[in-house]
Amino acid sequence: MSFKRLVIFTTLLTFGLIMLGAYVRLSDAGLGCPDWPGCYGKLTPKMAAEHIADAVAEQGGEHGPVSMHKAWKEMVHRYIASFLGLLIIAIAVMAWKKREELGQSPTLATVLVGVVCLQGAFGAWTVTMLLKPAIVTGHLIGGMTVLGLLVWLWLRQTSPARTVAPVHDTRGLLWLARLGLVVVCAQIILGGWVSTNYAAVVCTDFPTCQGSYWPTMEFNHAFHMVRELGETPDGQILNVASLTAIHMTHRLGALVVTAVLLLLAARLWRNPGTKALAIKVVAVLALQVTMGIGNVVMHLPLWLAVAHNGGAALLLVTLILVNYRVDNHAVRGHGFTR
């Protein structure tokens, strides 16, 4: 397999794994196997069937965190993640061996190995630390980071004719593209915080929340990082007002993202060479906003919640594409090459 095809395959697998991870988390299967890296010390849930049966009996049925089908969801996610790690190591090895042929520094591929190792550690801590919100959110950030770096690496393998759009005016556009990427990343983190704190269903109406445009909110515990799931730092139950603060912050963040990306799209539209990018930004943004609203009014159906995670990843990929093309043109416009 060529280096480019390996990068493309790994990127697509990473996108799929992010969707699968969201499915595992949203179907409450994150502790389907409450140890790591195996399942009760076994390679597969089938081998750990006796332990799983004991856990099911102890928790009084399969409605708890452990069951055979939840164990399989969790372990399939781990199997694919392990395979992904091996692919990224292979990418780094090929990047070093073929650095002269590719005409590229292997630094990005090497950084990817470090990031995926850290991501594996977050995956282990997610289980061993019993789904602490900060750890689970960190795991999501790690997955998105791996995807973003792979997309950038993929774009580096494409020809200049396909990646460098003829931008007539780059003044300010690059900084606006950077801002768009930053606000999207921040919104993804906020979305992860909503999901890991189970704050998505605290508001079931739109555009209001609990019948008000500004419902009762408490921020003092809502964004406290060092605490257990569903609790305040001092061990009290996290109240509805705190969950509402988390949810509403994500909604306000969506307004900021929408404003910035529409401004970016308008700027891209004014350049004939980047009109296609403007259409992509608006299309993905509209899809993501629609799914976000749908999750509220439809009370978070599993399929739509998973799709919303995929939409976030797709929005990230779109902004990386925009930044790569604008940045590539700006660098070449000043007489440099990549």
Image (spheres, rainbow, N blue to C red):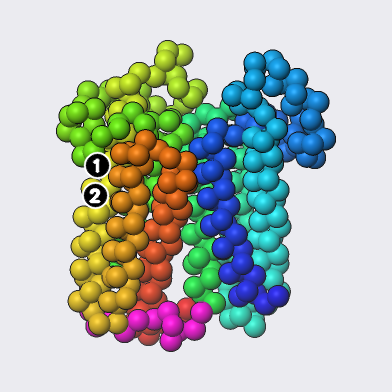
CB atoms of marks 2 and 1 within 8 Å: yes
Span shown in magenta: 158-172
Q: Amino acid at mark 1?
A: Leu
* Mark-to-mark CA distance, 2 and 1: 7 Å
Q: Residue at x 68, y 61 (%)?
A: 87
Q: Is residue 218 visible?
A: yes
Residue at the limit of the structure toward the left, as seen here: 213
Location of mark 1 (residue) = 252
Residue 134 vertical placement versus 102 (above, below): above
Residue 227 vertical placement versus 104 (above, below): above
Location of mark 2 (residue) = 256
Residue 282 x %, y %: 28, 64
Indicate the secondary structure of the residue bearing disc 1.
helix
The N terminus sits in image quarter: bottom right
Q: Amino acid at mark 2?
A: Val
Tell me if mark 1 has few (under 14), some (14-19) or many (20+) residues whose alpha carbon lies within 10 angstroms of its own. Answer: few
User: Magenta part mainly helix, strand or loop?
Assistant: loop
Q: Residue at x 64, y 81 (%)?
A: 100
Indicate the secondary structure of the residue bearing disc 2.
helix
Residue 269 vertical placement versus 43 (above, below): below
Residue closer to the observer: 95 or 19:
19
Residue 97 x %, y %: 71, 74
The verdict on residue 135 being magenta is no
